Image (cartoon, coloured by chain):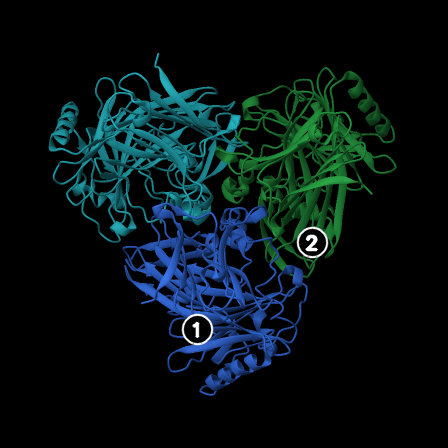
Chain colours: A cyan, B green, C blue
Amino acid sequence: MMRHKAWTLTDATHDVWLDSFATGNDRLGLGPGNWSMRKRTLHGGLREGVDLIEVDNGALSYIILPTRGMGLWHGLYHGHFLGWRAPVHGPVHPRHVEQAGRGGLGWLAGFDEWLCRCGLSWNGPPGEDVHTDRAGRQRRDVLTLHGRIANLPAHFVEARVNLDAPHELVVVGQVEEGMLFSQRLLLTTTYTTVPGSNRVVIHDVVENRGGEPAELQLLYHCNVGPPFLEAGSRVLLPSREAAPISARAAEGIDTLDTYAGPVAGFAEQVYCYDPVPDASGRTLAMLYNAAADRALVVRFNRNELPCFTVWKNTGALEDGYVTGLEPATNYPNFKSFERRQGRVPVLVPGGRWECTWSLEVHDSKGGVAEVLKEIAMLQAHARAVIHRVPQAKFSEPPAPA
Amino acid sequence: MMRHKAWTLTDATHDVWLDSFATGNDRLGLGPGNWSMRKRTLHGGLREGVDLIEVDNGALSYIILPTRGMGLWHGLYHGHFLGWRAPVHGPVHPRHVEQAGRGGLGWLAGFDEWLCRCGLSWNGPPGEDVHTDRAGRQRRDVLTLHGRIANLPAHFVEARVNLDAPHELVVVGQVEEGMLFSQRLLLTTTYTTVPGSNRVVIHDVVENRGGEPAELQLLYHCNVGPPFLEAGSRVLLPSREAAPISARAAEGIDTLDTYAGPVAGFAEQVYCYDPVPDASGRTLAMLYNAAADRALVVRFNRNELPCFTVWKNTGALEDGYVTGLEPATNYPNFKSFERRQGRVPVLVPGGRWECTWSLEVHDSKGGVAEVLKEIAMLQAHARAVIHRVPQAKFSEPPAPA
Amino acid sequence: MMRHKAWTLTDATHDVWLDSFATGNDRLGLGPGNWSMRKRTLHGGLREGVDLIEVDNGALSYIILPTRGMGLWHGLYHGHFLGWRAPVHGPVHPRHVEQAGRGGLGWLAGFDEWLCRCGLSWNGPPGEDVHTDRAGRQRRDVLTLHGRIANLPAHFVEARVNLDAPHELVVVGQVEEGMLFSQRLLLTTTYTTVPGSNRVVIHDVVENRGGEPAELQLLYHCNVGPPFLEAGSRVLLPSREAAPISARAAEGIDTLDTYAGPVAGFAEQVYCYDPVPDASGRTLAMLYNAAADRALVVRFNRNELPCFTVWKNTGALEDGYVTGLEPATNYPNFKSFERRQGRVPVLVPGGRWECTWSLEVHDSKGGVAEVLKEIAMLQAHARAVIHRVPQAKFSEPPAPA
């Protein structure tokens, strides 16, 4: 069993609340390495009252946002910025996000994270989800863009340090998405990093705490801008198929793998991938720069997260030049379409879903080359079919005008 | 005149604010009894920043939520839990409640109280209230579920102790519901309990602070789960008539008085009652358990609160197994229907409406039997007509499909 | 260059935050005069968490609301109240304002300021703005009443005192209005007053921080009630044309310049003016009382703010008896109409718009008479055409019923 030192930072149920917190290897002296974990609350502007937990493993650091559903605001690896420069002065407290506003697109007002979860009961575009539920009842649920979880605060947060090598630094958080006459899903997320490493491992468990079967949609919106994204950057993953999600995305199919520099007014393009895994389901995707010496790698398991989406939003730097690498339970179509495709898992009462995946950073040609080799080996098992136009299995045709 | 000691906890107008507060008989030494009153602010999750005032009279305790319109979160009587286990980790700060969200049902995201006021300008389901106001103007008001008051914070809160026996413990709060081009109603609520007693008395005054006549709708949503609600629990009140509010409720008319245990997926059933009062208007309703040794009693005056509604929502425990006992100015139909039935009182400018009612708890067979006797005596004055289908005077027929 | 002492009160980006702050001439001893600047945070009710900065120049004082887009809550000049008594217990924290609520009119729930900015991307009534943007894309933007800026908190606030005479007292604030797939506009506002003077000068700069051209709409909603507004008060400005915005306003055209006392149920009336400036563009408007010994003057530059609107809302005192003097880039019609009239300036990426205007108070017959003379001299250059019915250039005809 792991011997660890643990600090409860928040436990709303039991009235535990630390206004601020700090620990580090200068205090604990667990071997070499200069790591730390800190909690504080931000002030002023849209960030007033937002809590953050800064984990620095000595090489890689990242900021967890309990106030925003345990997302990752941004990070640094050997001084390289991890995240993007969103056109909003975040992190944004949920109280400034009116999700039903702007025709259901109000979620965008809070969106500026490196990692933002879209879910848990739904993700994708807004609309009215008219359907018959498992109990045979007709429902009309008004869905807003990308669901509620990113704007719900954690009611439980704990920091832990493993006293035994390799002295993992761990932050656990719990966020519940529920309300009367709705689903009740509990997210328990665990971020783990080893001091000095280039990786953070995310372990998420979603439990159905309600008394009826519950649908789950969860998409990990990992967003990256410079210095990983630039003109000539590439995105690669081993895949059986890839397809543009829309006519607009089809326009860019010839440059599926590559990125242009910032172009003011660029309209977003989205591509759906069917990843090729190894025998255990493991697969990965990589975004790397033009010189192939800086990369962000997303490692995930296709048995847990069968869908992968690339979001290209290479507008002006000032408008949020960014790409999204998005492992998920589904593609980001309207929920009813994903349900019909069988891509909305159902959890029985008390049932749980979980996944383990990681964000990994490289800043050497050697590191990038190794990952390219990994991808090539997986791709060797399957021919990649690149569809030039949207496919019925990946996305819904637009309604006739 | 009452000699009392008083503490202003909040007075926004005069910059009075106590972060925390505590008093009790250990300090004041007013005869026997171990009572206390405390104020503090909650932290973490959806409850971050919610103030609460805990009143413990030595036998009965309850928690008042100034941040949520002076509702009662939950209580305890001799260790018995008063309230329900809502499928949300509350109490929920109003900033997390987007009332216009989910098609006007966003109010549900904050609903977890033992006592929640629905009003003041309207309650009932969401919709567009197209009507001609008293000044002859056409209005189109967009109403959200159950009105604004439960998500408005009190701007004035005072705690008082009567220095003379029986040393009542009193909390007064004021909440204003107003905005330009709208009604302006001021709620002044007073919670009073006698040390050692089994009762809290609620005195509410609503004043029209605007310059034009104002409509009032106020429904007291008293919500109870186990250990008062269980398979075999019963609800009784002396009534002239009772009717299901809908076809769904009509399905349960044979078990009008009784409750089943939790049934996953149970769809709510609502019943409207016309209570029988005594010569002074006094009447009451009781929910009691299968063994008839635990009960929650709601005492009210039919001259002030002419309508009584029972809400049966006996779904799974995890989904909020609960029943509502709801004395009110009206039945929970859409406002325009209630207006047509003459059940929406109008307050002239400067006018006031008030009511006094109470929540009472019993935990002995003797106590329950006494209340049953009271109910029977009132019922003796009138034959109770139980309608098997919805009645035009109690509820609006559904729109044809 | 100005030698000044400066205090950063808020700088969210650099983690600067002063919970409270105070300075004054008693500390700094800069010549005569009894001025002060203070910052604090309000508690209780709807104002919980609202920051305010009180500037008192010894004769004129005003309260700036960083939490509400740097608006002015209210002021005092020689004891005369500047502002109005809105039917809401403000100032209201933006978290209690659901802008999409009430059919897009939710903004009203927070409206109680002396000076409230309406903008920046739009102002005017709510609705769906279907249009083709400058990049040729079809857009459907859901606009809410009077835009976002008044409910966005400042991320940067600084207080300054000029060490040289006349020792101006300065407060600078920055508020950004942005989000993904939207415009990104930065407001930098500077409030300046000279100790002992009767004036505050407002200098606003709006910069387009996005990568695409951005539209700007900005209306300064200056709201005044008693003791400046009363039966017999008048509003005057030099104008070429004035017109009622609607049939309702046309009903009051015979009393365009004058005000009635409070009348319960009075329906608002709005008038559009084309102001006459001097050779430099300078012009002004004045509201003065029946005795012509108290006045609020708005001085502005027609080259910067070409449109002027008067809002008469002389309902009951309790419902917010008030008039608005509103210099602006546009008239308060729906954005698409103003766009078609060429009254929506476009800022290129990096481009800026600015204006300097002032609020000035008089409390003597002599002061009022001097301003009347100024207005008369400007009016001497142009005949004022008063339209008795709405004009196509000032307002959109109502849709046929």
- Picture layout, residue A354 above or below residue C353: above
Residue that carries the numbered disc 2 in the rendered image: B214
- Picture layout, residue C375 above or below residue B349: below
Residue, x 71% and y 16% (percent of image)? B290
Q: Describe the element under mark 2 as helix, strand or loop.
A: strand
Q: Which mark is residue C300?
A: 1
Mark 2 neighbour density, 10 Å: few (under 14) some (14–19) many (20 or more): many
Mark 1 neighbour density, 10 Å: few (under 14) some (14–19) many (20 or more): many
| Left or right side of C2 for B303 | right
- Picture layout, residue B343 above or below residue C296: above
Residue C394 visible? The answer is no
As shown in the figure, which amino acid type bears the numbered disc 1?
Answer: Phe
Residue C387 visible? The answer is yes
Q: Position of residue A54 (x, y in %)?
A: 34, 34
In space, the residues marked 1 and 2 are separated at their CA atoms by 40 Å
Q: Please determine if labels 1 and 2 lie on a single subunit.
A: no
As shown in the figure, which amino acid type bears the numbered disc 2?
Answer: Ala
Q: Describe the element under mark 1 as helix, strand or loop.
A: strand
The count of marks equals 2
| Left or right side of C46 for A235 | left
| Quadrant in the picture for the C terminus of chain B | top right
